[in-house]
Image (cartoon, helix red, strand yellow):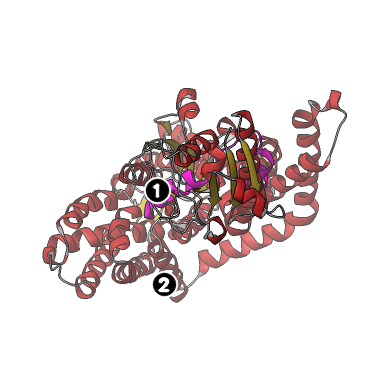
């Protein structure tokens, strides 16, 4: 039996400190050793220290160690004390007995550890032993509202970041075409940590019992390594850690709700709505091949029924339903869909759908959390009680409270957009165009796009044309700049320019992100100027667009774009302005 004393001191709070203390104490007892631990209000006495053969310091911050003079000290983080307790104690005993080879501890850096990469064992003479870190396996999910660029860029950034740190990660991409590279049960069981980099709702049920780190696709794209480190720094769930982890998850949920909760719910609704509106819009555009008003019973009329009467009729119910789903999970889906359909019937437009979604989600969530039934009837709650009560509440609120005011707002907005003069049109185009380039696929970009897409259901097509043109301009302008002024771009940027040209014509603004990340203070202003000019010109020329996506490929469909020649001129001028601004602002590459 070995006499051991230990200190546990976490920077994250009392719960983590107590977890480490209890883990060390119980594990030492099971191994037949005597361990006394100091944690929070329980202090070591001089007698405890004098009798000890070795000292374990499990701390995430600097602790004064003068009182342990002459004693061998084995120092690790509190996370390692919780996760690898038996190995920590064995290494401490080996140090006390002057054994030369300490076993490697799978280290995970702690965010508050001043030297997270150096868990060391040392004696009075400060002899250090640094155990080598072992390979970690992570799993992850990435998802963005459109399910196109950010989803896959975040996945690639996580893979690159994990490789730089010597780890491996398997990432499931939940994009516009569904889940790819899907995680299996075996993958999840083997994983040391889970990373969710998503701007939309992701079902987390299958990851219960795993360290789970949630962030945005933007954070993952900008610093994949930091996200991987943060995931591995979380304490590993154990039976003793259940209450602590519950508190951690509660705190994280509250922070996430304050930071981006409503916006994230809106983006979830948009992400599910986009496939419906894109499919419907493109089918409507195809119907124009047979004329603006195809004869009844013709093939063109059939396409119009599919795209207009069916797909577009689902826009408001779907965005409402999946906003509610993001807030309250499955119990919110039924009242959200029904509330969205009612909003459409009441002519409340996409604003009514958004309002119905939030009302349905929060009402369903409130009922789920506050209405308690006897155990025998609890099964009725998700299939009867929540859908019935929440749908009834939402329906009555929309009919008697919100229906009239929201309908008036939508009618006023529609009238304004239909009758606005050229000055107002240019100002609106400047605003929408500039927003498309501010963050290139981020929140501001998505806000402008969502506004334009929502107006399609009210037969307002000019803002959609301005938004798509302005979204194509940044990657096209940068591609042109890399071709004309090669000396101002390195080889990697020149290669990225070729890719950006393809993404630009496809209306994927994210093609400009690599350039903006490398030189944001020159690239982003240039892109904003070019996109704002494009949006203003599109509105000034009276261009319209009946499809919500497609890039230059939509231009080939007759009648899909109003004033198609001038539309091409607006895109070309904006791209040229972007390229010229970049060439003026950007410095020549010196190496």
Q: Secondary structure at mark 2?
A: helix
Q: Which mark is residue 230?
A: none
- Quadrant in which the N terminus is drawn: top right
CB contact under 8 Å: marks 2 and 1: no
Q: Which residues are magenta?
A: 220-248
Outermost right residue:
374
Q: Secondary structure at mark 1?
A: helix
Q: Give the percent coordinates (x, y) of residue 199.
A: 50, 48
Query: Main SS type for the magenta part?
Result: helix
Q: Give the percent coordinates (x, y) of residue 338.
A: 69, 39
The image quadrant that residue 569 belongs to is bottom left
User: In this figure, which residue is indicated by the disc labeled 2?
Assistant: 426
Can residue 114 be seen at all in this image of the molecule?
yes
- Quadrant in which the C terminus is drawn: bottom left
Q: Give the percent coordinates (x, y) of residue 387.
A: 76, 35
Nearest to viewer (mark 2 / mark 1): 1
Magenta-colored stretch includes residue 247: yes
The image quadrant that residue 512 belongs to is bottom left
The image quadrant that residue 282 belongs to is top left
Residue at 81% across, 33% down:
385
Residues under labels 2 and 1: Cα distance?
A: 30 Å
As drawn, is 415 to the left or to the right of 515? right
Question: Is tag 2's residue or tag 1's residue first in the polypeptide sequence?
Answer: 1
User: In this figure, which residue is indicated by the disc labeled 1?
Assistant: 150
Residue at 40% across, 51% down:
117
On screen, residue 43 above or below 320: below
Q: Give the percent coordinates (x, y) of residue 382.
A: 75, 31
As drawn, is 114 to the left or to the right of 523? right
Residue nearest the viewer, comparing 82 with 399: 82
Residue at 42% across, 40% down:
98
On screen, residue 252 above or below 133: below
Magenta-colored stretch includes residue 175: no
């Amino acid at each position: 039996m070995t006499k051991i004393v230990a200190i546990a001191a976490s920077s994250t709070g009392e719960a983590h400190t107590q977890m480490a203390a209890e883990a060390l104490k119980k594990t030492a007892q099971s191994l037949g050793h005597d361990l006394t631990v100091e944690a929070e209000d329980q202090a070591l006495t001089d007698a405890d220290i004098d009798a000890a053969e070795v000292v374990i310091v499990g701390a995430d911050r600097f602790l004064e160690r003068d009182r342990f003079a002459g004693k061998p000290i084995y120092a690790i983080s509190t996370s390692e004390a919780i996760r690898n307790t038996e190995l920590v104690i064995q290494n401490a005993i080996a140090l006390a007995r002057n054994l030369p080879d300490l076993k490697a501890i799978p280290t995970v850096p702690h965010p508050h550890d001043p030297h997270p990469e150096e868990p060391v064992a040392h004696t009075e003479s400060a002899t250090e032993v640094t155990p080598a870190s072992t390979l970690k396996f992570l799993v992850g999910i990435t998802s963005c509202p459109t399910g196109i660029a950010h989803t896959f860029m975040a996945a690639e950034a996580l893979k690159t970041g994990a490789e730089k740190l010597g780890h491996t990660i398997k990432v499931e991409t939940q994009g516009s075409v569904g889940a790819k590279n899907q995680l299996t049960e075996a993958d999840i069981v083997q994983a040391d940590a889970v990373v969710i980099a998503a701007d939309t709702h992701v079902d987390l049920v299958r990851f219960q019992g795993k360290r789970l780190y949630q962030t945005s696709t933007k954070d993952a794209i900008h610093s994949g390594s930091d996200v991987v480190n943060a995931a591995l720094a979380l304490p590993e769930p154990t039976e003793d850690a259940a209450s602590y982890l519950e508190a951690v998850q509660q705190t994280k949920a509250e922070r996430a709700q304050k930071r981006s909760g409503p916006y994230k719910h809106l983006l979830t609704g948009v992400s599910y709505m986009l496939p419906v509106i894109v499919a419907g819009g493109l089918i409507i555009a195809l119907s124009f091949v047979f004329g603006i008003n195809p004869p009844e019973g013709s093939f063109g009329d059939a396409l119009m029924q599919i795209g207009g009467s069916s797909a577009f009729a689902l826009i408001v119910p779907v965005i409402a339903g999946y906003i509610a789903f993001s807030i309250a999970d499955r119990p919110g889906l039924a009242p959200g869909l029904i509330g969205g359909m009612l909003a459409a019937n009441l002519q409340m437009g996409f604003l009514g759908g958004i309002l119905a979604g939030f009302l349905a989600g929060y009402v369903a969530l409130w009922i789920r959390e506050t209405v308690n039934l006897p155990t025998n009837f609890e099964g009725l709650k998700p299939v009867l009680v929540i859908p019935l009560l929440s749908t009834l509440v939402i329906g009555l609120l929309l009919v008697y409270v919100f229906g009239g005011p929201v309908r008036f707002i939508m009618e006023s907005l529609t009238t304004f957009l239909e009758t606005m003069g050229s000055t107002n049109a240019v100002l609106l185009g400047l605003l929408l165009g500039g927003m498309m380039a501010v963050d290139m696929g981020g929140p501001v970009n998505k806000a402008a796009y969502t506004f334009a897409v929502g107006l399609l259901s009210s037969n307002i097509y000019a803002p959609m044309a301005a938004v798509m043109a302005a979204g194509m301009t940044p990657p096209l302008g940068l591609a042109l700049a890399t071709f004309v002024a090669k000396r101002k771009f390195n080889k990697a940027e020149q290669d990225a320019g070729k890719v950006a040209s393809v993404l630009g014509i496809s209306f994927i603004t994210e093609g400009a992100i690599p350039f903006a990340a490398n030189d944001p203070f020159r690239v982003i202003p240039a892109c904003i100027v070019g996109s704002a000019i494009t949006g203003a010109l599109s509105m000034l020329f009276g261009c319209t667009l009946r499809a919500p996506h497609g890039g230059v490929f939509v231009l080939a469909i007759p009648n899909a774009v109003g004033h198609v020649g001038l539309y091409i001129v607006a895109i070309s001028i904006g791209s040229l302005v972007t390229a010229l601004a970049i060439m003026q602002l950007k410095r020549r590459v010196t190496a």
